[in-house]
Every structure is written in structure tokens, then in C-alpha cells.
Amino acid sequence: MNTKSLSKVLKEVGVNRKGQNHVFKGLNSEDKQLVYDLSAIFTRSEAINFAEKGYNKEHFHIPQVDFALFCTANENLPTMVRFLPGPVRDIKSLALSVKEIGAKNKTLILDRDFYSQGSINILNEHKLSFVIPTKRNF
């Protein structure tokens, strides 16, 4: 593929949520375990209008774009990448992501930052199995 063709395809997929879901559905496997995490990309670009300053573990005070990621535990393939507007709390992003992906008959693996009664309630509401380590001081 030449660079112009590839750039055009990536741009089209990037602005087309339906196209993204189609790509991720093709990558989805029969794996029964999904890993979920939140991350951020820092930017000084003025062209990204949804980048906002928010909490991050590096304590940088520059605009960032938050995103959520589901990937298969065994094959490490992404099954959903979702950009989140502004600084979003873990529980709210988890609820939106679980609803979007429709993760029935899967076990979600989350890191200890998701451990809260709110997260557990959301996962139970969606009848999902999950693994969340407790925080050290719990």
C-alpha cells in the first residue's frame, strides 16, 4: 500500500465509529477473557478540540485525550478502543464501555484502580464475571 492510500483508510476508520466496530469485531476471538484499562495520550496540538487537562499519574498539567481499551487476554488483540471526552472517572467509563462492547459470557480482568463498590455494582448489573485485585490497604 502506498502512504496516501493507507492515510486515507486510517482517516476514514478514525472518524467512522461503525467502521471501527467492524474492524474490532473482526479481531474479536472466542477468548473468554477480556482485559480492560484506561490510558491517556498527552498533546499540545491545538487541532484536537476534545483534549482537556485532567488527572494523570504523571501529574502533567497539559491537555490529554483519555481512552478505554478492551483486548483479549490470550491473543492481546484489541476488541475496542474508545476515546473519552474530558477527564472521565473509572466507573463511568467502565459502564459506557461494557454497554458498548456487549461483553456477555466473558470474564473481565481489571486493575486494582477499578476496585470500588460502584464498579462491582456495574459489573453485576451486566451479569459479567470479573477479576479485580483489591487495594493493598483494603
Image (cartoon, grey):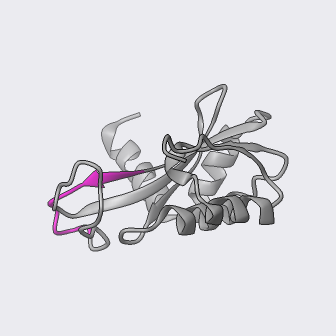
Task: Determine if the magenta segment contains residue 41.
Answer: yes
What span is colored magenta in the figure? 39-48
Q: Give how far across and how far down residue 80 sits, in percent.
A: 59, 50
Report the number of numbered marks: 0
Residue drawn at (83%, 58%) of the image: 127
Residue drawn at (35%, 48%) of the image: 7
Seen in the image, is 136 located left or right of residue 118?
A: left
Name the residue nearer the viewer: 131 or 32. Answer: 131
Query: The N terminus appears in which quarter of the rendering?
Result: top left
Seen in the image, is 75 located left or right of residue 123?
A: left
Classify residue 43 by image quadrant.
bottom left
Classify residue 101 by image quadrant.
bottom right
What secondary structure prevails in the magenta region? loop
Q: Give how far across and how far down residue 44 sits, in percent.
A: 14, 60
Q: Give how far across and how far down residue 23 sits, in percent.
A: 61, 47
Say above or below: 88 vs 106.
Answer: below
Say above or below: 8 vs 52.
Answer: above
Seen in the image, is 68 located left or right of residue 31?
A: left
Residue extending farthest front: 137
Classify residue 126 by image quadrant.
bottom right
Name the residue nearer the viewer: 4 or 21. Answer: 21
Seen in the image, is 88 located left or right of residue 73?
A: left
Task: Determine if the magenta segment contains residue 10.
Answer: no
Residue drawn at (29%, 55%) of the image: 56
Q: Give how far across and how far down residue 119 sits, in percent.
A: 63, 60
Residue drawn at (20%, 54%) of the image: 59
Say above or below: 41 vs 93.
Answer: above
